[in-house]
Image: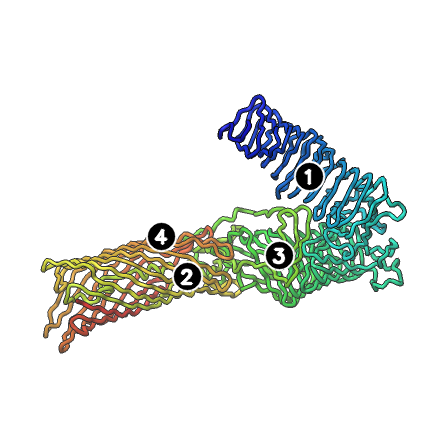
């Protein structure tokens, strides 16, 4: 093909030879067993996802592959230029006399056994060689980034790292070059291991400049002894020309790495060798190093870490008496925002001062010998901790003390800040084999909130406790359950005078509330109340699935970067201790975790004669139910609530009314008290009237704004605690009404009234400041009412009317599912309900001069088919609304003129379960 359009736009099946003597972009997909040959001087781009198997030959110009599939699966014979402007893994074997060019900003890995001799040019991005044969045998010109990342020796002609480029030699990799050239502002990065017995770079000639960056040196276990460790970095056949301008260790200036004496230079006795030596400053006097020995470990860069896998022992007997450091030979100081990891059995006997950043003990590591009285002092902006580790001595904590799996302090602990579980799963234990004092300290634990056997983090103090400590609980996948003794979170072996209080007084999950209770010196999370149980409820608490075993956090522990707010590490694999380069902010425990309500009595597991106990319910149950009830309640109305008196003097009217009241009720068998205050402003008007002179039909529109606030109080816990919550609902109702009167003028006799309303509402719940929720809800309502009015004539045109009535109303309420700050899913607020009303109304018509006064009284029996309910987690809870209620209304209407009347009414409802509702309303109506 002499141009890229020659083969059309379809796929190409090539089972022979496809020669492309052209430039441009060829994006047709090529398949088959044949070969593709690029000829001519132009630059041809292959951009299709090609699967041809016969190989590729480049005899002229440049063949550019824009993806790693572009050259099919066969070998590449390159006798011109192959440009790879892509990322990914290119494993085709490349041979020939041509050059390979890596362009584009992506990372490309060459993994094939390549034998091309035309050299390699890296113009942009990163080229990774994962096979020692990957780069052929020609010259390498690196203008971007080259990574040699294969076990063994790379053999090349000349390797030149140009200005602002980096060549990195990975762990286990070595390089043989004719000439190694590191230009000014270039970087040679070398990862050292304890097995580097031979030179890492061998060359005929070496020209050095730029920066030498050493990594891996912190993990060389064998190097950190009393003897310095030496590496031959470069071994040249001729004298090494010049030197590196800068020497860094893991990106840090080697001169600032105070805990190491690291040096790199051309060997003074053999100028063909470049040596790197490293020794631990702790043992500097033993090494006869240039610097004086000291015990300060400064890791200044946030995110940097250094692992020390050899034991630190007392060296006071070998210190140089002329040392300028004044070090005692047995104390450690941690400075800087980075992380120091101690991985051995350290026996130094002096104090440990964690002044900045993080000091972490790896698995099985120790500080101090058994019986030691040394101290670990944690400063306000610092962190200390470990995974399956031990401190033999005392701990004074003014920062953050983290523990993962098991962490033991064989001594006293004074906690003036935060002790934090460093895992995101429970079953971590901090053991203090001594006394514990809390100086307004904080303790953060993970618990799977359920029954007594629930997995939990734990503080164990074998001695005495004193002072005050706030406990923060994070629930981990717990559904809540009834406890008997409770979930033990703090165990005290000695005198238990310490005061532990639960943050905000309680934690809630689903319908359950847990409080902290001291019993026999130990401290438990309990979900029981102090009420006498009532087993008449119909709510079944959720099954928590049996014994729960949290995931093992085993694995290598990698301590945290400590450069910001302290975030305890996730230990579901490798444990990463927290970062902490500012004020220590322990993790948020998500607000109050409220255990699920079982809406009835819970009977603990049977182990003989067990007395049923009542759980302590979360207080905000009442707010969710109260919001629901208020929205439904404020849709309810009768004909006379809306119309006022049945007497009319015109064919149409507009009207408005204001209603305000207070309702009281209970929930979950009387364990939650609900108090609501509400108001409503309603406006409506007739839009269509019809009359045949006797009967009439009126149709109108109406709308209202409602607002209600609810306060809820939960039952009292076993520790005497009692909690409250509050919330509100507001929104709008829009509706349509239609009324038929048998007597259009006097409204005597029969009538039928019907209406429909739709409401949309905004809801809020504040659970005692622990969590705040916002959600939307909606309600539909349809009503049908009928009645018959009898008139009894009195003197002076006055009359008394008696009107028996019946009404049926259907409602459907729905609300969004809410997940609160404690992780509880509140759902199930999607209910249909029916309410029926039977009643009688007595009203009079009294003429006073030119006006008319109409007092009235109404008595109703209300019967409802359903309560307001919601599901917290897996547990359904209901409001204790009585099925049957009695309602009384009294009021008066006065005709201000022939067209304008006002109407006032007081109403009250009463029923079982301490239910009550009292309201006052004021109506105004204008006829035309």
C-beta proximity under 8 Å, tags 2 and 4:
no
User: Regarding mark 3 in the picture, which secondary structure is present there?
Assistant: loop
Q: Is residue 536 left or right of residue 119?
A: left
Instruction: Report the residue marked by disc 4.
Output: 831
Visible residue check, residue 536: no
Describe the element under mark 4 as helix, strand or loop: strand
The N terminus sits in image quarter: top right
Residue density around tag 4, few if under 14, some if 14–19, many if 20 or more, within 10 Å: some
Q: Nearer the viewer, mark 3 or mark 4?
A: 3
Residue sticking out furthest to the top: 16
Instruction: Determine which residue is flagged by label 2.
Output: 670
Identify residue for label 1.
Answer: 121
Lateral position of residue 319 relative to residue 792, left or right: right
Give the CA distance from mark 1 to mark 2.
81 Å
Label located before the other in sequence (4 or 1): 1
Q: Nearer the viewer, mark 4 or mark 1?
A: 1
- Looking at the rendered structure, the secondary structure element under dot 2 is loop
Q: Position of residue 83 (x, y in %)?
A: 63, 36
Marks 1/3 in contact by CB < 8 Å: the verdict is no
- Give above or below for 24 relative to 459: above
């Amino acid at each position: 093909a002499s141009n890229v359009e020659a083969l059309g736009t379809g796929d190409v099946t090539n089972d022979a030879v496809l020669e492309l003597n052209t430039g441009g972009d060829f994006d047709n997909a090529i398949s088959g067993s044949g070969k593709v040959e690029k000829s001519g001087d132009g630059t041809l781009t292959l951009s299709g996802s090609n699967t041809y198997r016969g190989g590729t030959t480049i005899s002229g110009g440049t063949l550019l592959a824009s993806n790693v599939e572009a050259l099919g699966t066969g070998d590449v014979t390159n006798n011109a230029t192959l440009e790879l402007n892509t990322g990914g893994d290119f494993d085709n074997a490349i041979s020939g006399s041509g050059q390979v060019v890596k362009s584009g900003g992506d990372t490309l890995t060459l993994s094939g056994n390549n034998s091309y001799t035309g050299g390699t040019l890296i113009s942009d991005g990163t080229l990774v060689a994962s096979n020692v044969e990957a780069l052929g045998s020609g010259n390498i010109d690196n203008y971007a980034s080259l990574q040699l990342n294969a076990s063994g020796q790379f053999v090349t002609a000349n390797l030149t790292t140009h200005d602002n480029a980096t060549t990195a030699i990975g762990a286990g990799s070595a390089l043989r070059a004719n000439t190694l050239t590191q230009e000014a502002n270039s970087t040679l990065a070398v990862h050292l291991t304890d097995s580097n017995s031979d030179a890492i770079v061998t060359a005929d000639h070496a020209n050095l400049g730029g920066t030498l960056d050493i990594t891996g040196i912190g993990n060389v276990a064998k190097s950190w002894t009393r003897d310095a460790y030496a590496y031959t970095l470069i071994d040249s056949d001729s004298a090494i020309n010049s030197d590196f301008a800068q020497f860094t260790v893991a990106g840090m200036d080697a001169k600032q790495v105070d805990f190491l004496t690291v040096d790199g230079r051309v060997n003074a006795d053999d100028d063909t060798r470049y040596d790197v030596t490293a020794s631990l400053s702790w043992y500097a006097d033993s090494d006869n190093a240039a610097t004086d020995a000291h015990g300060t470990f400064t890791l200044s860069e946030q995110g940097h870490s250094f692992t020390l896998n050899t034991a630190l022992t007392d060296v006071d007997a070998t210190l140089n008496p002329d040392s300028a450091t004044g070090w005692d030979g047995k104390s450690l100081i941690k400075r800087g925002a980075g992380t120091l990891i101690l991985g051995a059995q350290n026996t130094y006997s002096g104090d440990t001062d964690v002044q900045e950043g993080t000091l972490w003990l790896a698995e099985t590591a120790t500080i101090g010998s058994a019986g030691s009285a040394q101290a670990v002092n944690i400063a306000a902006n610092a962190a200390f901790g470990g995974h399956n580790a031990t401190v033999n001595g005392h701990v004074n904590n003014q920062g953050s003390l983290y523990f993962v799996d098991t962490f033991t302090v064989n001594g006293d602990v004074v906690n003036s800040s935060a002790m934090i579980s460093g895992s995101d799963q429970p079953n971590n234990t901090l053991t203090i084999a001594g006394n514990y004092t809390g100086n307004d300290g904080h303790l953060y634990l993970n618990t799977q909130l359920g029954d007594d056997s629930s997995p939990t983090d734990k503080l164990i103090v074998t001695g005495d406790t004193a002072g005050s400590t706030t406990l923060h609980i994070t629930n981990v996948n717990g559904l809540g359950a009834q406890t008997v003794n409770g979930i033990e979170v703090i165990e005290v072996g000695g005198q238990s005078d310490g005061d532990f209080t639960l943050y905000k007084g309680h934690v809630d999950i689903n319908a359950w509330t847990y409080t902290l209770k001291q019993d026999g010196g130990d401290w438990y999370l309990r979900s029981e109340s102090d009420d006498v149980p009532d087993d008449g409820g119909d709510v079944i608490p959720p099954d928590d699935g049996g014994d729960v075993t949290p995931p093992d956090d085993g694995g290598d522990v990698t301590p945290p970067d400590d450069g910001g707010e302290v975030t305890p590490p996730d230990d579901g694999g490798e444990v990463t201790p927290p970062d902490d380069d500012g004020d220590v902010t322990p993790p948020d425990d998500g607000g109050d975790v409220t255990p699920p309500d079982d809406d009835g009595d819970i009977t603990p597991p049977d182990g003989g004669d067990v007395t049923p106990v009542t759980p302590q319910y979360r207080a905000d149950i009442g707010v969710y139910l109260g919001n629901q009830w208020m929205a439904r309640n404020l849709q309810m109305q009768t004909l006379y609530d809306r119309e006022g008196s049945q007497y009319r003097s015109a064919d149409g009217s507009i009207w408005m009314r204001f209603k305000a009241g207070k309702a009281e009720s209970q929930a979950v068998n009387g364990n939650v008290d609900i108090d609501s205050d509400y108001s409503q402003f309603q406006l409506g008007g007739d839009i269509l009237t019809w009359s045949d002179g006797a009967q009439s039909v009126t149709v109108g529109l109406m709308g209202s704004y409602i607002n209600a606030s609810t306060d809820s109080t939960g039952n009292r816990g076993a520790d005497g605690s009692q909690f409250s919550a509050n919330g509100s609902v507001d929104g709008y109702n829009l509706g349509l009404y239609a009324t038929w009167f048998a007597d259009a003028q006097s409204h005597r006799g029969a009538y039928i009234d019907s209406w429909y309303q739709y409401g949309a509402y905004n809801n809020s719940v504040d659970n005692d400041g622990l969590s705040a929720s916002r959600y939307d809800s909606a309600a539909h309502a349809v009503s049908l009412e009928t009645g018959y009015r009898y008139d009894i004539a009195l003197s002076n045109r006055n009359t008394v009317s008696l009107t028996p009535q019946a009404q049926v109303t259907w409602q459907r309420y729905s609300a969004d599912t809410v997940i609160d700050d404690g992780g509880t899913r509140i759902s199930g607020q999607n209910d249909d309900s029916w309410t029926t009303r039977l009643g009688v109304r007595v009203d009079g018509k009294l003429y006073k001069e030119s006006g008319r006064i109409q007092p009235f009284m109404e008595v109703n029996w209300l019967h409802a088919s359903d309560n307001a309910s919601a599901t917290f987690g897996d547990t359904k809870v209901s409001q204790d609304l009585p099925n049957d209620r009695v309602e009384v209304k009294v009021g008066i209407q006065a005709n201000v003129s022939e067209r304008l009347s006002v109407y006032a009414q007081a109403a009250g409802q009463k029923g079982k379960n301490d239910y009550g509702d009292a309201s006052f309303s004021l109506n105004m109506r204008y006829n035309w």
